[in-house]
Every structure is written in structure tokens, then in C-alpha cells.
Image (spheres, grey):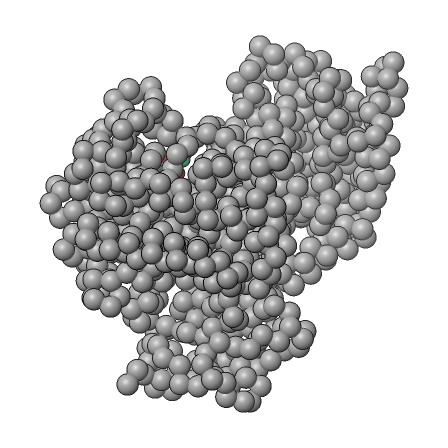
Amino acid sequence: MKYGQFDDDKREYVILRPDTPIPWLNYLGTRDYIGLISNTAGGYSFYRDARLRRLIRYRYNDLPSGINGRYLYVRDEADGKYWSPTWQPTQTKLDNYRCRHGLGYTIIASSFREIEVEATYFIPPGEAIEVWSIRIVNHRTKVAELSLVGAIEFCLWDALDDATNFQRNLNIGEVEVDQCAIFHKTGYRERRDHFTFFACSEPTVGFDTQRDAFLGPYRGWDRPIGLERGKLADSHVAGCSPIGAHHVRLTLDPGEEERAVFLLGYHENRKTKFRDAEQQALYTEDALLKIAHYRTADVIDRALERLHVNWRETLSRLQVTTPVPDADRMLNTWTPYQCAVCFNVSRSASGFESGIGRGIGFRDANQDLLGYMHLSSDRARQRILDLASTQLESGGAYHQYQPLTRKGNDAIGGGFNDDPLWLILSTSAYLKETGAWSILDERVPYDGAEGSETSLYEHLTRAVEYTLTRLGPHGLPLIGRADWNDCLNLNSHTTDPDESFQTAVLRSDGTAESVFIAGLFCLVVPELVEIAKRRGDERAIRRFSEADSTMRCSIEAHGWDGRWYLRAYDAFGRKVGSHKNKEGQIYIEPQGICAMAGLGLADGRALTALDEVSKRLASEHGLLLLQPAYTRYDPALGEITSYPPGYKENGSIFCHTNPWIVISECRLGRGDRAWEVAMRINPAVREEMSKVHRCEPYVYAQTIVGRDGPDHGRARNSWLTGTASWMYVALTQWVLGIRPSYGGIEIDPCIPLRWDAYSVVRAFRGAVYNIRVENPDHVSRGVREVRVDGRAIVGSILPTFSDGATHNVQVTLRGEQ
Ligand code: GLC
Ligand code: GLC
């Protein structure tokens, strides 16, 4: 059963009923001002940092869910009936309802009692203002006397403090009201130079800034007393629970249409703080100018058009036409869009990430870059440098940093020994995309410390040294707190129920080793060797090539279990992920990462391992992380065994790992299998089973409950997952085989046998390639000929033109003979 449909021409997902299984989200804004908005206008906004600069108050784990956010009410003055045209919070049964989630905007339209209301939400490019542009049409044959009320509840900046520190927070709320605008200035008198404003384009007949005055005692947002009475209280907040609410009266003739705009903005006063220091009155002149500018429909329509153009241009850098519409709509629109969202917010703010616990993850952000690189290489470059500047002198890394301060922290644990290696992967991907080698010579500090700067190149070499100085008894990398699998806590052995697995103290003599990190090492170190070659760094070439071969030998000798790669050795030297174990016999991660690194391709081990993956880990909803799932808690393994079987790291379909198998299958040349694995978790394919899947059908989720869970197939943690980036890389670079390499775009497809042809338009280093791939012999892999602008080239790497022109590339496949 579906709740909506794709509109591919408009690049929108159209939701046809408001009661989706959970609120289905979209994101507004791409840089500083970010908003999360659900299909009923729930959600919240923040400026740069989801914890420290939260603008709208939001309650996770609240009931009914999806209530808080952007409140809109219409009131029929004839009889006092009022409703929410976005359905929440009043949940009035609307005569019709449509929500269009598009790229950086959401439009919610509905009709009730022949009054049509359409609300368009977006952030004008480059601004820290959220526009709610409202269109109201009277479809009655009589004049309609209406009220329109827009409201939000202000968050007192630090979202954690806001949700916990009531003894203080019920006493600090302050606002100023200036006709059309309500300025939320809590904390401004002391150290802040920023405020939030909520403004209305139309003359108002009333306002409220105190929540209790607007809602009335013991009432929720579904039945505010202000709406019941038809009159707001013009309240001035004193201390507690500041809100912004504006009341507009409208008289609409039959067929008449009116527009009104609500503006929610963040403003910093850099120079003048007070208009009147004596009175501690806000300096609002600059903010008022902005508000005045965005009051008119014309300006708003043009800003929205700019937003559309920006996205069109950004996405035009890679567009595909394959025989499979569900693949095209993901690759052309939704996956790169999701990659951009992950780039912007990492794992901090979603329907499942509260914006409080997690900032920009070191491992996560490096992987998110892989699918983002071609969309904005400048921003990617800056992100790489930001990440590197949180690296430690040892070559190790903090697990995350807070976007506002760019300072690394261990708040959700540290010492994940895979972390630093991912920096090499993102940097090499950047070099392959851009050819901009100068990034390697950028001077970057360690842990942000002034005076500690070295070249980025040295940061990369230190990341490798970090691993090399942390090898265990089998010559495999020590795992530290955990590796990519955050829940494989092999050195913590905690039995204290009140302790977090992620921050529990580790054994200082912990010798647990990770085959996954070993595989990751063999994936990234050859990249560093390639880079060293181009810099003529002989010492590095020698040292790292040797280290790579030695690591490969260690994996072959100690990381192979007979039919698949082991997962790890625990702190007692026992095997994890072995057929000898009772549970957790086979894990997906090492099979993927080792094959991706080219291990076992020559001797058939990769083939055997991937066959075991499809035999043991395949389910109708995707590939499981491990089998059999753990049924009891084992302190030697940690958090992974804390989840019930089938959930999260304990045997769910942890989607992030599935594209690794897609790439691995491509490395084996099995195009049909690669495709099959990718399409199983494709959200657009799963749209038909939305009732089971439950999350948005247009973006990947972190997990889908595995075969061992009673709700097998149910997705969770949508939006912020490395799945988007990896699946994008797997499908565009490995299946469609349009792969950036240091020397240019390499053509190396691995497609389903039945495909006749497909095409790709790809912008790359200052030119556009119009690529058509024909498959007359119905093979999966093997390039017979590549013609560029009519002439056959030698090899399969396209020449780099950088001439701003479009070049036609004709590729013909053939079977391997
Ligand atoms: C979460 C984390 C990611 C980790 C994964 C597996 O998605 O953000 O860093 O690799 O879980 O534990
Ligand atoms: C939990 C989750 C894991 C996540 C980690 C981050 O362990 O299971 O996916 O990466 O928390 O804090």
C-alpha cells in the first residue's frame, strides 16, 4: 500500500494523505539555516548547529507524534470553526490534502469548507530566513470572513538545556514585539548577539508571545483558546515559554485569492547590539529590512525560482537513463539530494537523531563526501580540511566535532580505530573528481591547535601510521573501542546497566583485532601509494606498499575462516564471525570491504565469500548484517548483543553495508547480482510496501528490521545514513561504470545481462560527457570500444577536456572471450 507517488518531472514526492506511518520528512536549506519539515509541517529549524542554535522547540518521543513545528490555523468567522490546513495539530478531516516534498521546499495544500489553502515552505538561497508563503482561495459562492493564525514555539537556543533545565528556563524567556514582528531575544541581554524573529507580511489584529495565554491552561496546540475565542491575547511573555503567534483577518469574495507570508528568521547583530542600551532594546533595523524585503509575493516567487535553478544545475552534473525508472528517479534526484542532506547535517538532526547527541561524525562525514564530491567540490574540499583539522597528532581522530566550534569531542566515545583511515578515502575521491592536487599541500592543524600545522598529505600518512603502530597478535589492526560497527565493543566488557557502551572504560590491555579495519587498510593504502607516486615520495611508496602487502598476508593467514572472512578476534584471542561460533557466524562487513580492496579476487576466496553472503544473509528485504543473530548479551562483544535479534547491528539489514556488496559483486563481474542487491533496498521499489517499510519511500534508511525481528521489513532511521553515498557510488561508478580516476573518467560497467543500453550525462573537470553505452551481446562486463566525439580511444579512460564543451562518448560492451 502506498501513501503517495513520485512526480519525476517536478522532482517531487507527492503524499496523498496526512497520516503516513510516521511523519515523512524533508529538509529546507543547505548551509547555515536548516529546517526539518514533515508532511504536516512538523519539525524544527536551527542555525548551523542543531543543538546550540535551535530555533523551534521540538519534542521527540511526544504523542501524538509529529505535532510540534510550524502551526497554521484557519478560522471561519461565520461560526468559529477552526482547522489546520496542514492537518496537524487539529487533525481536522480535510476534504483533500496534498504534500509535495521537493528539493529544498515543501508545499502542503488542502481544502476544507471550500476554502483552499496552500502553504509553501522554503529558505531563499543564501538567507537565514524560512518563508511560509500562504495562498488562500475562497471557492464558495459567498463572501468568506476568515482568520489566519501562524505560530511557533521558540526554543531557548541550546536544545538540550531547553528540554531539561526548567528551574532556569521557565524564568529567562524574553521577546520584543514590533507591529508585524516578534523578536525572540532570550539570552540577548547577556552574551548573545543573535535573536530569532517571527514576522507576518500582513497587518495583524492580534498576537501572542506567551504560550499559556495562547493555548489556555491544560490545552494543547490542537485547541488553542485563542482560536476558540477568535481573539488572541496580545500577551507579552514574562519568563516562561515564549512563542510567536500572529493573527490576520481576511475577507475573501467568491473566487478571490489572497496571499500572506510568515517569516521565521535568525539574525546576528555584529555591530550595533542595542537600539537603546538604557532600555536594553534590541537593534532590529537590519532584521526589519530583511523582513520588509521578503514580504512581497514577487520577491518570494523569484527566490523560489532561484532555489529551483540551483538544484537543477547541481543535479545536472550527473543524470542517467537506464531501463529501470525506480533506479533513475533515485539516481537523478533523491539519492544525490539525500547525499547533500547527509553532507549538511551528518548524523545530527533527523526524525531519529535529536540534534543533541551527535555532531559531524569523522567516519560518517568522510563517507558522506563520496556521494557529494561532484555536487560541490568546493564545499567538499572545505569539509575535508575541517575534518583533518580535528585529527590528532598521533594520526588518530576524534569521533565527531560540533559544527559551530569545529572542535572535536569524545562525547559519544573515542578510540574507534577505523576512524582516521576514512580521511584517505575521501581525499582520494576528491582528487579523482577534481584533479586539484593542491589540496594535499594545504596547511592543516592537529586538534585545531595553532602552530601544529602540516600538509594535508602528512595528515594522511599519519592516519596510516596510526594503524601501523596499533597492530595486534595476528598482525591485524587493533579495534580500539570499535570499528565501523560501533557496537562491536570488544574491549569494554561492561556489565553495568547504567553505563553507555559508547563511553564505557576500555581495558587498557585490549588486544582485540579487526579484520574489517585490515580490509579498509587495504582499500585505502593503495590510494595513498598512488598519491605518493604522483608526489615522487619514494620513501612513502616503499613503506606503504610494503605495509599493504604485509596486511594482505595477515588477512590471508589469519582473517579467513574457510568460506568467508572472519570479523575479528576478541580481547581473549577468540574468533568472532566464524563458523565455529554458535551465533554471529558470518558478518557482512569484512566480506564487502575485503572484496572491495581486491582481496580474494585472484584465488576465488571473494567468490566463495560472496556466495555465502547470498546464501546466509539474503532476505526478501535486503542483506542482513550477520547471522545467526545474537540471542543473549555477551559482555565480550558489547552493544551488538544488546539489541534484540534482527535490530540494528544485531542482524538487521544495516543498509550501509549493502552497497559494499554491490561493489564487490561488480568486482567479480556479476552484474545481475549486483543489481538485485541494490534494488532490494531501493526505497522507490519498496514504495508499494509502505505499510511495512513505514519510512519515506524516497530516501534510504539506516536499518530495515531483519528476518529475526517480528516486524521484518520495517525501516528505521531514515535520511541520515551512509547508505545514500555508498549506493550512489556503487550504482553510478561500479554498475553504470562511470568512475572518476586520477587520470580521468574510467568506463567500466557491470550491468544486468538483459539491458540493451543506457546513457549518462556527466560533468567532470570542466567539460560534459554525453555517454551512451550499448550492450548488443547482452553481457555484464567488458568494454569492446569507446569512441569520443566519433574517434575510438585506446583504453577506457576518457580524455580530460576542461573546455566547457559537451563531448559525445559511445561505448560498446562485449563478453569476455
Ligand atoms: C551508525 C553510525 C556509523 C556506524 C554505524 C554502524 O550509522 O553513524 O558511524 O558506522 O552506525 O555501527
Ligand atoms: C549506537 C548505534 C550505532 C550508532 C552509535 C552512535 O551504538 O547502534 O548505530 O552508530 O550508537 O552513538
**Residue at 62% over, 76% down:** 801
686, above or below 282, in the image: below
Residue 344 in which image quadrant:
top right
Quarter in which the N terminus is drawn = bottom left
Residue 132 x %, y %: 70, 43
Residue 688 x %, y %: 39, 57
- As drawn, is 36 to the left or to the right of 703? right
Furthest-front residue in view? 539
**Residue at 49% over, 37% down:** 393
**Residue at 64% over, 19% down:** 241
User: In front: 570, or 811?
Assistant: 570
Q: What count of labels does the image hold?
A: 0
Furthest-bottom residue in view? 791
User: In front: 255, or 42?
Assistant: 42
Residue 177 x %, y %: 80, 24
655, above or below 358, in the image: below
**Residue at 62% over, 34% down:** 450
Indicate which quadrant contains ligand 2.
top left
User: In front: 801, or 437?
Assistant: 437
786, above or below 616, in the image: below
- As drawn, is 74 to the left or to the right of 578? right
Residue 488 in which image quadrant:
top left
- As drawn, is 536 to the left or to the right of 29? left
Quarter in which the C terminus is drawn = bottom left
User: In front: 602, or 313?
Assistant: 602
664, above or below 750, in the image: above
Residue 12 x %, y %: 57, 57
Say whether residue 409 is visible. Answer: yes
Say whether residue 708 is visible. Answer: no
